[in-house]
Amino acid sequence: MRMLNKNQRFHWLMLLPACLFLCVFLLAPLVMMSVLSFRDVDSMMNTLQTYSFAQYMQVFTTDAYVKAIGSTVWVAIKTTVICLLMAYPAAYVLVKAPNRRLRAFFYILLVSPLLTSVVIRTFAWIVLLSQNGLINGVLLDLHIIREPLSMLWNMNAVMVAYVQVMLPFAVLPIAASLTDINHHLRQASMSLGAGRIRTFFRITLPLTIPGVITGAIIVFSLAAGSYITPLLVGGRMQPLLPLSIYQQVMQVYHLPLAAAMAFTLLVFVLVVVSLLSYLLKRWEARLHA
């Protein structure tokens, strides 16, 4: 018992620096921003010492902000679905590579974009999709189109850039789930008469659902809170809540309203993540039942 207490104290001592860091740089700013979101402002956008729900009322009664909330959640959901549909085959190929060298090459190919700044990757899409960019240039040279296509400054461009940026975060959890599957289970299923397709849907897919849900949580959270990618590719007029927050902070300097928007976005993300986490726990309980 004494040794156990010593181990517990040692573990808490090791966690102390990380806990202090989170308290100072995460919890404290969240509390300060929460207080700020209830502050009133005067006609010059100066923050007053009085408190009210005026900022939240403005968020939920202004059509533009309500549309931005809906668009943000919907775009994040679509990005998550597209990433998962593309990530599962990629993860399967990654895990089932015939040799270690090819598997290592696939992992390097997957992770290498994460070593590059999101801003650089987003500017690369501008080079590709602009009217004088590579795609329009190739199509014009092949006489497929007569004039350049407008592929930038719209939500479709934002979705394409989102998927490219978020895809590795969906592939890695699914690949980890595929790696953890005991290969004897598939062999037993096929030895009992099940074909490859039936084995996949009865054995492989159910066992990888935790990885799919984990990838969905990561992708949805990142897509809902991203503002650099839609700002550069879609333009600042896109109806997305992170862009509205950016405008209120950097252009209007309405800090209480920006804080209220930020907490609104945080609540919506937490609701979706909580639902996905609940599904994850239920599915894992079902697997281990």
Image (cartoon, rainbow, N blue to C red):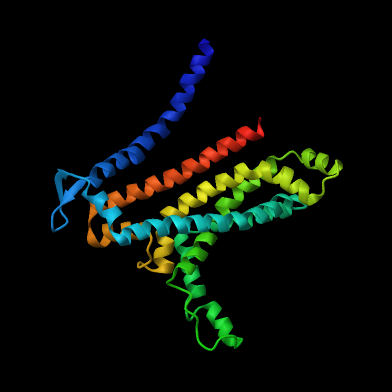
* Residue at x 31% of width, y 61% of height: 63
**230 with respect to 50 (left or right):** right
* Residue at x 73% of width, y 53% of height: 101
Total marks in image: 0
Residue 289 rendering spot, x and y as whole percentages = 66, 30
Between 112 and 64, the one lying in front of the other is 64
Residue 12 rendering spot, x and y as whole percentages = 45, 24
> Which residue is situated farthest in the top direction here?
1
Residue 79 rendering spot, x and y as whole percentages = 52, 58
Between 34 and 18, the one lying in front of the other is 34
In the rendered image of this protein, does residue 120 appear above or below residue 60? below
* Residue at x 66% of width, y 52% of height: 91
In the rendered image of this protein, does residue 151 appear above or below residue 77? below
Residue 84 rendering spot, x and y as whole percentages = 59, 54
**192 with respect to 72 (left or right):** right
In the rendered image of this protein, does residue 219 appear above or below residue 126? above
**83 with respect to 96 (left or right):** left
**162 with respect to 47 (left or right):** right
* Residue at x 86% of width, y 44% of height: 193
